[in-house]
Amino acid sequence: MTALVVLAAALAVAAVVGALATRRRGALTATTVAPAAEPTALGLAVDRPTVVLFSAPWCGPCAAVRRVVEQTCAEVDGVAHTEIDIDADPEAARTLSVLSLPTTVVFDAAGRQRYRSTGVPSAADLRAVLRELLA
């Protein structure tokens, strides 16, 4: 009986560790890298911050990010957003070193990359980043 309890506890710990190790949180991290491509080539707005979502039709989590981005951009005035399908435009993904999906990049009004997230960012984090850029 004790061996069964120990085995169940070990499996539970392994499941939690495995879930934490593979979880893609989507925290937005500050960056100071300027885009190597022309901002208009990426569909960036020239007068306001732009959220760019890199996605693909086969990417399941991209739909969740799409909802977060669309909802947040609708709530925060003065923000543009665009989506780039990496299958249709692999050069844009290469230019910005997008290595996994979904990736969300926030550019300021001058076209400089300011924040990046891999995974699904929270709406609150995205709102905070955008409000900081609009301040």
Image (tube, rainbow, N blue to C red):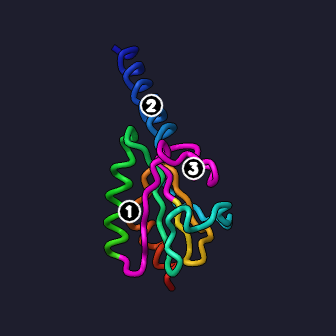
Closer to the chain start, of discs 2 and 1, is 2
Residue picked out by circle 3: 93
Label 2: state its secondary structure.
Answer: helix
- Picture coordinates of residue 17, whole percent (x, y): 48, 35
Residue at 32% over, 72% down: 74
- Picture coordinates of residue 109, whole percent (x, y): 55, 78
Q: Is residue 89 above or below residue 113?
A: above
Q: Amino acid at mark 3?
A: Ala
Q: Which mark is residue 32?
A: none
Callout in the foreground (2, 1): 1
Q: Which mark is residue 69?
A: 1
Q: Is residue 4 above or below residue 52?
A: above
Determine contact: label 3, label 1, CB under 8 Å.
no
Residue picked out by circle 2: 13
- Picture coordinates of residue 132, whole percent (x, y): 51, 79
Q: Is residue 65 left or right of residue 48?
A: left
Q: Looking at the image, can residue 25 be seen?
A: no
Q: CA distance from mark 2 to mark 1?
A: 34 Å
**Circle 2 Cα neighbour tier, 10 Å, few/some/many (<14 / 14–19 / ≥20):** few
Label 3: state its secondary structure.
Answer: helix
Label 1: state its secondary structure.
Answer: helix
Q: Which residues are magenta?
A: 76-104
Q: Is residue 20 above or below residue 106?
A: above
- Quarter of the image that includes the N terminus: top left
Q: Is residue 107 left or right of residue 6?
A: right
Residue at 56% over, 62% down: 41
